[in-house]
Amino acid sequence: MNAYWIATIGTSVIAFLLKYSGHSVPEKWLSHPRIQRVNTLIPIALLSALVAVQSFSEKSALMIDQRLVGLSVAMLALMLKAPFPVVVLSAALSSAAVYNWL
């Protein structure tokens, strides 16, 4: 058994234990208003971090390219309350146009 198998089995066990411990938390703790407020904000923070990392980095370098244009157009469409398919298509088309122009 090499190091990759040990790492795979170890991370699997850790993931299982984390998931099991999450299901073992008493309901009383989870029903606290402060915990509920924090739990509603965690997905927003994670998605925002993912968008920032995917939009402004390539490997380990900071990049500003056509992705910034697509993200800006998407934010503008969201501020104008456009439907989600319009937001995605406008961002993709603007990013593609800048990519082909450069």
Image (cartoon, rainbow, N blue to C red):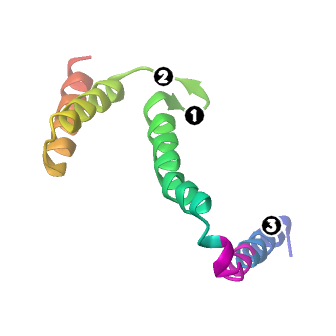
**Residue in front for this viewpoint, 53 or 28:** 28
**Callout 1: SS:** loop
Residues marked 3 and 2 touching at CB (< 8 Å): no
Tag 3 residue: 7
Which residue occupies 52% across, 49% down? 46
**Residue in front for this viewpoint, 44 or 91:** 44
22 part of magenta stretch: yes
User: Around disc 1, counting alpha carbons within 10 Å, would you say few (fewer than 14), some (14 to 19), or many (20 or more)?
Assistant: few
Specify the quadrant of the image occupied by residue 73.
Answer: top left
Specify the quadrant of the image occupied by residue 30.
Answer: bottom right
Mark 3 or mark 2: name the one nearer the start of the chain.
3
Which residue occupies 53% across, 56% down? 37
- The numbered mark at residue 63 is 2
Query: Alpha carbon of mark 2 to alpha carbon of mark 1: how far?
Result: 9 Å
The magenta stretch is 18-29
Specify the quadrant of the image occupied by residue 3.
Answer: bottom right
Tag 1 residue: 59
Amino acid carrying label 3: it is Ala
Could you say where residue 47 lies in the image, as x and y percent from the top left? 46, 48
Query: Alpha carbon of mark 3 to alpha carbon of mark 2: how far?
Result: 32 Å
**Callout 3: SS:** helix
Query: Magenta part mainly helix, strand or loop?
Result: helix
Query: Alpha carbon of mark 1 to alpha carbon of mark 3: how far?
Result: 23 Å
Taking 61 as reference, is 89 above or below it? below
Mark 1 or mark 3: name the one nearer the start of the chain.
3
